[in-house]
Image (spheres, helix red, strand yellow):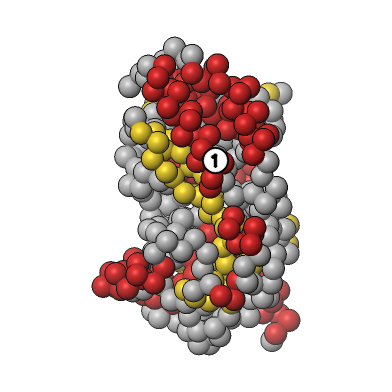
Amino acid sequence: MDLNKEQRETLLGKIQAQVSEKYFDPTFDKSAWDRIIQRHRSAVVDASDAAIFEKAVTEMLSDLSPRTLGLLSERTKINPRNAINASFSVQSIEGGLRWVFQDVLPGGVAVKAGVQTGDVLLTAAGKEMLPSSDKALEPPFEMGHTIPVTVSRGQPSEVVTLSLNTGNPKYKDNPYSDLTAVTSRDINGVAYLRVSLFQGKVGIDFANELDRLFRGSFAASKNLIIDLRGNPGGGIGGLALMSYLTPNRLPVGYSKNREMAEKRIDPSTFPRFSKVPRSRLAIPGLALKFMGKTSVYLYTEGLGNQAYQGSTVILVNEHTTGAAEMVAQFAQENRLATIVGSRTPGRLVSRKASKLGFGYRLVIPVAAYVSAKGTQIEGKGITPDVEVPWSFSDATAGRDNQLDAALKQVSTANTRTS
């Protein structure tokens, strides 16, 4: 829907007010934000159609925060981890830069289309896909569409035509195409758990699936690999996974909102969230306890000793964000697992989407995450204990060099303890 000038003015006013009131950043400078508004006002208000308006607003928001602020509509293109359940690496191929599929998550859009790790993206919707630099942001994709793509595969290379059928978003505040959140298998006696997404805001189904695995096929496992590569985060279900890493009730961390930062509120006064419910019957009680609370303190559930504790590896990479980073940070800080892979980006702010009207929502960071040990990794990320960059050449040969390194690490840990 195209907007008239008065409607664009109204939306700009709401965006200015909501950022001024809710945007979380202890160094937020309202006068600087007002200057950004004035600098972009003409481009936003005088936009000739919806696409130009959305581009102008995105550029304006990027001047304040290029990664945490966003405008959402039914036309908004979404990052590939959410839209097609895959992530990309920039690689130099035959003298030029190309997007290469790196994480292709189980049960997702890309897998269903036939995409394989190591495939080189050539075109999407008839347009050649070329990264502008080796640091370029991943190409976004529209949801609710069938997108024809061509990829180059193998050596010698073969051009393959595929169709990405992106889903309609289940959550408008955090749109993503559905996938298989949890998959597992045994690799030569090592329990392997891939967590592709922490589905659901509360994580009831996710927690129940973990219970089934850890009380079933993983019950006697002495070695465990948790693969969080490409995981974009999600809801609070990650607390259930953290609880299986330690026998004790341990403090995990808390979210710090703007009011807390400005008033220096003691986090020990926050309400505690210490168990992911296993039944929807518990939701009304949770709603009453935590309604309107931006800041809560997370504690693990205290699930007791597990055979694999002391021999656990967590795989992460540059596409591991949000709640997945929280899990990895908790494990690393408490020495509950060895972190293997590549550095995470440090994207752990809590974001909230507020309705603006005319089919638009504004995504705003409203709180920062602080670990129980007082550490914030926003913008810094997690440095693995064992750094292993992803290998494109290994991927094209059908090998996963990071997983191989994780298996080697488990083997080394067993040698030390035997």
Quadrant of the image containing the C terminus: bottom right
The residue at the point 54 percent across, 51 percent down is 366
To which residue does mark 1 refer?
A: 19
Report which quarter residue 384 is drawn in. Answer: bottom right
Residue 186: x and y in percent read: 48, 69
Residue 35: x and y in percent read: 65, 28
Report which quarter residue 210 is drawn in. Answer: bottom left
Q: Is residue 309 above or below residue 122?
A: below
Residue 86: x and y in percent read: 49, 43
Q: Nearer the viewer, residue 1 or 306?
A: 1
- Is 32 on the left or on the right of 259, as rendered? right
Report which quarter residue 185 is drawn in. Answer: bottom left
- Figure label count: 1
Q: Nearer the viewer, residue 352 or 76?
A: 352
Residue 128: x and y in percent read: 53, 20
- Is 189 on the left or on the right of 94, as rendered? left
What is the crowding at mark 1: few (fewer than 14 residues within 10 Å), some, or many (at least 20)? many
The residue at the point 44 percent across, 45 percent down is 353
**Which amino acid, by three-letter code, is at mark 1?**
Val
The residue at the point 32 percent across, 73 percent down is 285
The residue at the point 38 percent across, 40 percent down is 355
Q: Is residue 134 above or below residue 177?
A: above
